Amino acid sequence: MDSKKKIKYLEEENTALKEKVKRLSILMESIKSLNTSLRVDVVLLSIIRSATQVLEADSGTIMLTDDNGEELTVVAATGKITKIEGKIKVKVGDGISGTVAATGKSILVTDIEQDPRFKRKNNDERYKTKSFICVPIKVRNKTIGVLSISDRHTREAFNEDCLKILVALLSQASFIIEYARLYDEIRHHIQDWEPF
């Protein structure tokens, strides 16, 4: 390699490292900010906003499982799809979100039009790009839901680095979700409790 190629290579590597440091900094700040509320709706929106910010994406959803673990329901969303909470349900095992919930393993799709698991193709107006990432939300090795992110600002496909960042965010966020859910449950029991 001549010196010009080496310099160009080093400059590209330096730019890539700066981008990773930037993302990790945003990730750390996002994790810190998640502990500011115990309201489930606030926590869920905070997680989606953190994920979309760190991955430079427009849209995200969180789907949580029902009590039987058989169905996922959208409980929080950002981007063009904010009005779908409670309206979209997916059986565990169906489509990409259902598969992630069933297996507990993340799925990174670089082209939804070529992936047979994706039920809606890119002619659906909700998706500006063909790339999609879906990660399980786990508490004590049990999948309680999924986080899905789409529509990167750069129009580039998500990659393995994006997946690692999202998994790191959710490893911290899943416990906060569980604590917020327990807090809501206790709060409802106290409100319903009538002294005899």
Image (tube, grey):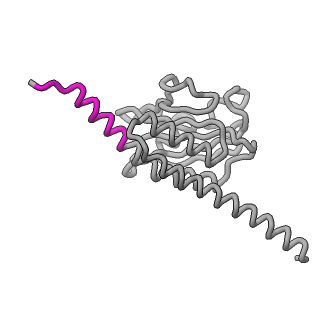
The picture places residue 192, in percent across and down from the top left corner, at 22, 25
Foreground of the two, 104 or 49: 49
Tell me the quarter of the picture where residue 61 sits.
top right
Q: Quadrant of residue 194?
A: top left
- Which quadrant is home to the N terminus? bottom right
The C terminus sits in image quarter: top left
- From what the image shows, is residue 176 above or below residue 87? below
Q: Is residue 137 magenta?
A: no
Q: What residue is drawn where x is 70% and y is 45%?
A: 110
Total tally of numbered discs in the picture: 0
Q: Residue at x 44, y 33 (%)?
A: 41
User: Which residues fall within the magenta stretch?
Assistant: 179-195
Magenta stretch holds residue 193? yes
Extreme residue in the bottom direction:
2
Residue 153, position in %: x, y?
A: 72, 41
Residue at 90 percent of width and 72 percent of height: 4
Which percent across, then down, holds residue 115?
A: 67, 39
Q: Position of residue 178 (x, y in %)?
A: 37, 43
Q: Is residue 22 left or right of residue 102?
A: right
Q: Nearer the viewer, residue 67 or 169?
A: 169
Question: Which quadrant of the figure has residue 79?
Answer: top right
Task: Name the foreground residue: 91 vs 155.
Answer: 155
Q: Is the stretch drawn in magenta largely helix, strand or loop?
A: helix
